[in-house]
Amino acid sequence: MRKLIEYNHLSIDGIMSGDAWWAGQEKVVPNDAHFAYQLGLLSSAVGLVLGRVTYEGFAQTWPTSTGDVADKINSLPKYIASTTLTETTWNAKVLAGDAVEAVAQLKKAGDGTLVKYGNGPFSRALVEAGLLDELHLSISPFVAGSGESLLSGLSTTAMDLMKVTELGNGTVVLTYRPSR
């Protein structure tokens, strides 16, 4: 069975989007450890799982990016949760029917890892359905002060800390597994 891992960037106050978050995130310069972490995360990936908004943002950026991480991301199939997309590019397809059930079927379809980027209602639904195996939170050293918080609206969900990885520049990745 495949493992589903979600990866998100956050400020230290738990914010993951908005103008203040982007302004702070732009000041955190990725280093070799950041890229090595992403390559490690993607090393066993057999596909990416994305919501529509994340897919649209990634599809504008990654196809023209270069380097090992870009090469890996660009080469992987992308599975998109959307009720509005009718066309995709960039080696992507919209998940048919109920997206949560489609991800459950993808997990059963073989070995390897599915990496999910982005956050929002789709992420909450995957957690609540018990499909998320790991949550990797890259915490950047700034306070955003405003914006959307990670997994807002999710019911109380206990997580076990599995690992802490320091990436330099004051950034750490906290790896959690839902308690079961």
Image (cartoon, helix red, strand yellow):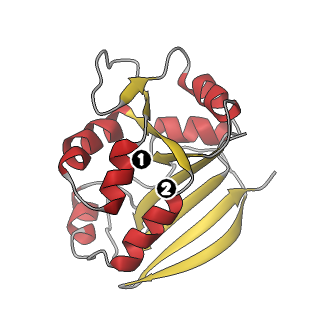
- The numbered mark, 1 or 2, whose residue comes first in the sequence reads 2
* Residue 22 percent coordinates (x, y): 24, 61
Say which residue appears at 34% left-offset and 74% top-offset: 143
Which amino acid does the dot numbered 2 rest on? Answer: Leu
Q: Residues within 10 Å of mark 2 (few under 14, many from 20)?
A: many
Mark 2 lies on a secondary structure that is helix
The percent coordinates of residue 138 (x first, y second) are 46, 68
Q: Is residue 100 above or below residue 83?
A: below
Identify whether 155 is placed above or below 164.
Answer: above
Image mark count: 2
The kind of residue on which mark 1 rests is Gly
Identify residue for label 1. 118
What residue is drawn where x is 59% and y is 30%?
103
Horizontally, residue 178 falls left or right of residue 149, namely right
Q: Position of residue 98 (x, y in %)?
A: 56, 18
For the point 68% across and 35% down, the residue is 110
Residue furthest right as drawn: 180
Residue designated by label 2: 42
Image quadrant in which you'd find residue 60:
top left
Does dot 1 land on a helix, a strand or a loop?
loop
- Residue appearing at x 48%, y 22% in the figure: 95
Crowd tier of the residue under label 1, counting other residues whose Cα lies within 10 Å: few below 14, some 14–19, many 20 or above: many
Residue 158 quadrant: bottom right
Residue 29 higher or lower than 150, as above or below: below
Q: Confirm whether residue 14 shows in the render.
A: no
Nearest to the eye among marks 1 and 2: give it.
2
